[in-house]
Amino acid sequence: MIHKTFLFDFRDLNLTVEQIERAMGYPEGESHEPIYDIAARVMKEAEAICDLKAEYRIFENITFDPTNKKVTIGEVTFDIGKIIFGQIRKADSLALFTCTAGKGIGENSRRAMKESDLLEGYIYDVIGSEAVEAAADLMQNELEVEMSMEGRKITNRFSPGYCGWDVSQQHRLFSLLPGNFCGIKLTDSALMDPVKSISGIIGLGPDVRRMPYTCSLCDMKDCIYRRKG
């Protein structure tokens, strides 16, 4: 079983203030100057407090149930739904991954909001979300390079809570990973701590492919991958 860990520096992410503004909903060049200035300052502070880490573990003992759109890894079955099933059904193995930006940025966001600085708290929150997704992109790119050396490919990554995959199955995903994997813990309601963390699944094999996110097939309007698409 292959298990790999990545530690990233915030500067590796190449995030820009303009990217944060877009994530906040501002078209390029249309935010107010104070917002740009606050975002630039918070971005600098985030560089010092983000603790970026990603891990994946590859499983080869997998079976697919095309009738019920489920996949089983070992003895754990996931009801992933038709969208994700369609993307990974040709995989010969699966990578389960987690990625986190650490506790600091979420704590700063909550502190700012508690002190009634809602804008700064929101910007911290947005930067945390963008940072963890960017770190996951780097992890996924590394996985893609490794697979290509074996003549294999990867799919997009998919997380519980998206594309019809119920977030409660996060517990099943974590049951296949070692304790404290990536330093993340789950609450009873399947939320991750640190809050700026993601987890999910990536299909691997010679007959799969990574492609633009099929957002037209999904009715989740506020999904971060819709912006990627």
Image (cartoon, grey):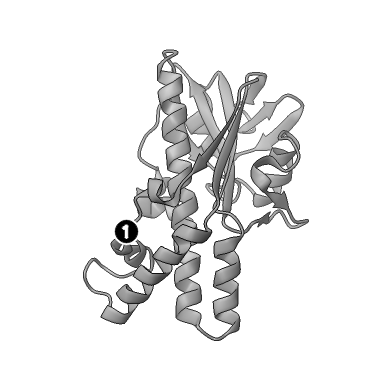
- On screen, residue 156 versus residue 200, left or right, reads left
In terms of secondary structure, where does tag 1 sit?
loop
Instruction: Please state the horizontal and vertical placement of residue 174, each as a whole percent of the image.
Output: 71, 40
Q: Residues within 10 Å of mark 1 (few under 14, many from 20)?
A: few
Q: Quadrant of residue 98?
A: top right
Q: Residue extending furthest front?
A: 48
Residue 221 in sight in this render:
no
- On screen, residue 11 versus residue 107, left or right, reads left
Q: Residue at x 63, y 19 (%)?
A: 60
Of residues 40 and 121, the one drawn nearer to the viewer in this rendering: 40
Q: Residue at x 23, y 74 (%)?
A: 30
- On screen, residue 62 versus residue 39, left or right, reads right
Q: Vertically, is 7 above or below 22?
A: above
Total labels: the figure holds 1
Q: Residue at x 44, y 51 (%)?
A: 10
Residue 167 in sight in this render:
yes
Q: Residue at x 46, y 54 (%)?
A: 131
The quarter of the picture where the N terminus appears is top right
User: Which residue in the structure is indicated by mark 1?
Assistant: 16
Q: Vertically, is 182 above or below 123?
A: above
Instruction: Please state the horizontal and vertical placement of residue 71, each as a whole percent of the image.
Output: 64, 29
Of residues 135 and 62, the one drawn nearer to the viewer in this rendering: 135
Amino acid marked by disc 1: Thr
Q: Residue extending furthest left?
A: 29
Q: Residue extending furthest top?
A: 150
